[in-house]
């Protein structure tokens, strides 16, 4: 299964779980949607990962600036919304690494730091009542991490990322099954087998 097929399966899981609605879980605030600045950060991080291999540095720099501005806009509400200092520090650190990597036009480091940024922002998504469960975002981040690990010939890290993916999948799978997602479950399970 290539990365585009995997993206399709993750999208199908996301749509399946959001089509029926879902209750807020894990302490998510019932009334609060994911703030726009966090949405901006996640969208820009994914765009950076897509653009970096072709070297579109002007676009990447625009996205990095958008991320920095969005983070600055979100920070005043972070603690009040329940973001731990550790989560805030993780996002700030990933942003600093992204700024350094993109300034040096290092595609591999830029993609890695953008994925680290995405992982940090997904942890913040979990504070809110998102239509898409945070674990779906975690699956996306982990699957990208496997690709990055393999590209770096770090098969030990890839195996660890795959183990983490399986653990998150085990949390998501009951909800997929409850929403009549047997076909999606079969496709994702086949993807995990192929990756092994």
Image (spheres, helix red, strand yellow):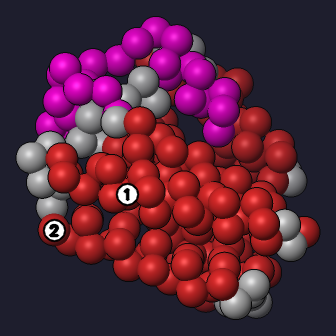
Measured as percent of width and height from the top left, residue 154 is found at 68, 89
Seen in the image, is 28 located left or right of residue 74?
Answer: left
Measured as percent of width and height from the top left, residue 192 is found at 67, 55
Measured as percent of width and height from the top left, residue 132 is found at 46, 30
| Magenta span contains residue 59 | no
Q: Main secondary structure of the magenta part?
A: loop
Label tally: 2
Name the residue located 49 percent from the left edge and 52 percent from the top edge: 41
Quarter holding the C terminus is: bottom right
| Magenta span contains residue 17 | yes
In-front residue for pair 67/81: 67
Lower position in the chain sequence, tag 2 or tag 1: 1
The answer to whether residue 185 is above or below residue 145 is: above
Residue 81 seen in this snapshot: yes
Name the residue located 18 percent from the left edge and 22 percent from the top edge: 30
Name the residue located 45 percent from the left edge and 80 percent from the top edge: 96
Using a 10 Å C-alpha cutoff, classify the residue at mark 1 as few (fewer than 14 neighbours), some (14 to 19) or many (20 or more): many
> In terms of secondary structure, where does tag 2 sit?
helix
**Which residue lies under the disc numbered 2?**
85
Q: Which residues are magenta?
A: 10-34
């Amino acid at each position: 299964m290539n990365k585009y097929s995997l993206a399709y399966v993750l999208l199908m899981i996301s749509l399946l779980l959001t089509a029926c609605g879902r209750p807020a879980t894990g302490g998510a605030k019932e009334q609060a949607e994911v703030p726009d600045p966090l949405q901006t950060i996640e969208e820009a991080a994914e765009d950076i990962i897509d653009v970096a291999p072709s070297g579109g540095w002007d676009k990447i720099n625009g996205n990095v600036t958008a991320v920095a501005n969005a983070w600055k806009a979100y920070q005043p509400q972070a603690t009040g919304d329940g973001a731990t200092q550790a989560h805030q520090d993780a996002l700030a650190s990933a942003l600093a690494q992204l700024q350094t990597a993109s300034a040096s036009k290092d595609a591999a480091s830029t993609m890695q730091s953008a994925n680290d940024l995405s992982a940090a922002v997904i942890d913040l998504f979990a504070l809110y009542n998102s239509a898409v469960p945070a674990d779906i975002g975690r699956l996306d981040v982990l699957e990208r991490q496997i690709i990055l690990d393999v590209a770096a010939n770090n098969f030990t890290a890839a195996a660890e990322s795959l183990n983490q993916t399986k653990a998150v999948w085990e949390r998501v799978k009951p909800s997929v099954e409850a929403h009549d997602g047997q076909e999606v479950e079969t496709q994702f399970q086949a993807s995990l087998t192929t990756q092994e």
